[in-house]
């Protein structure tokens, strides 16, 4: 492996009321509005994702500096639209930040360290964050649900049909990959029949 990171992802699956540009580095002259996510972090500049964001209907752009999680090609980096048109999801090395573009001081950092996959489910109006053991669903009004622990390690989404997500993951007790299903409306594990 060369260790080279893939280019950042942009996913505009949901309608959004903002424009954003990932900058190659922090500008020498900062815009009037600059926000650092999370607010308190050591060495945020090292590898941070620098995003210039222009909210719709506003002439006031702002710079979002998002601290890097991991410098690893296995974790995502990029920008995702969310079910809320005013929010942007910026991900830097698996650290995911949901930022309100109309009020950038309001943000949520997804608790997975790292987020391993981000999957928009437009039919359900959900943005899924996949961690090592469970899934968080983000809806128009914020976090819709968090699943229970689904695996001992290595969660993979296999398919989504209607309101049912099917996946698999390694089970420590059996030392095998086991399947699971989750109801996308509630985040609850479906009973296997």
Image (spheres, grey):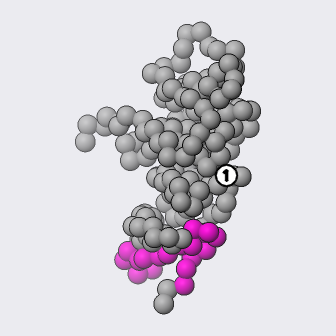
Q: Is residue 128 visible?
A: no
Q: Residue at x 50, y 70 (%)?
A: 162
Query: Is 79 on the left-hand or right-hand side of 63?
Result: left
Kind of element beneath mark 1: loop
Q: Position of residue 15 (x, y in %)?
A: 57, 43
- Residue 191: % across, % down: 54, 84
Relative to 152, residue 94 above or below: above
Q: Is residue 11 visible?
A: yes
Residue at the farthest top position = 29
Q: Residue furthest left?
A: 1
Residue nearer the viewer, 143 or 66? 143
Q: Residue 85 lies in what quarter of the image?
A: top right
Q: Position of residue 148 (x, y in %)?
A: 60, 70
Q: Position of residue 75 (x, y in %)?
A: 43, 46
Mark 1 burial class by Cα count in 10 Å: few <14, some 14-19, many 20+: some
Residue bearing the label numbered 1: 140
* Magenta region: 171-191
Q: Quadrant of the N terminus?
A: top left
Taking the spot 55% from the left edge, 38% from the top edge, the residue there is 90
Residue 138 included in the magenta stretch of the image: no
Residue at 55% across, 80% down: 190
> Which residue reaches farthest bottom?
193
The residue positioned 37% from the left and 34% from the top of the image is 7
Nearer to me, 151 or 63: 63
């Amino acid at each position: 492996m060369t260790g080279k990171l893939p280019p950042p992802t942009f996913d505009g699956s949901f309608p959004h009321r903002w424009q954003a540009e990932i900058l190659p580095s922090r500008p020498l002259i900062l815009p009037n509005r600059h926000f650092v996510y999370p607010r308190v972090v050591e060495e945020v500049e090292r590898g941070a994702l620098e995003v210039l964001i222009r909210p719709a209907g506003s002439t006031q752009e702002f710079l979002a500096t998002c601290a890097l999680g991991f410098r690893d090609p296995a974790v995502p980096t990029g920008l995702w639209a969310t079910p809320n048109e005013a929010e942007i999801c910026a991900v830097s090395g698996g650290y995911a930040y949901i930022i309100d573009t109309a009020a950038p001081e309001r943000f949520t950092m997804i608790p997975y360290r790292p987020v391993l996959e981000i999957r928009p489910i437009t039919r359900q109006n959900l943005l899924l964050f996949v961690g090592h053991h469970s899934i968080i669903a983000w809806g128009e009004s914020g976090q819709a649900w968090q699943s229970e622990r689904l695996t001992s390690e290595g969660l993979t989404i296999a398919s989504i049909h209607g309101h049912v997500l099917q996946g698999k993951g390694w089970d420590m007790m059996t030392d095998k990959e086991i399947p699971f299903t989750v109801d996308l409306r509630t985040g609850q594990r479906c009973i296997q029949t």
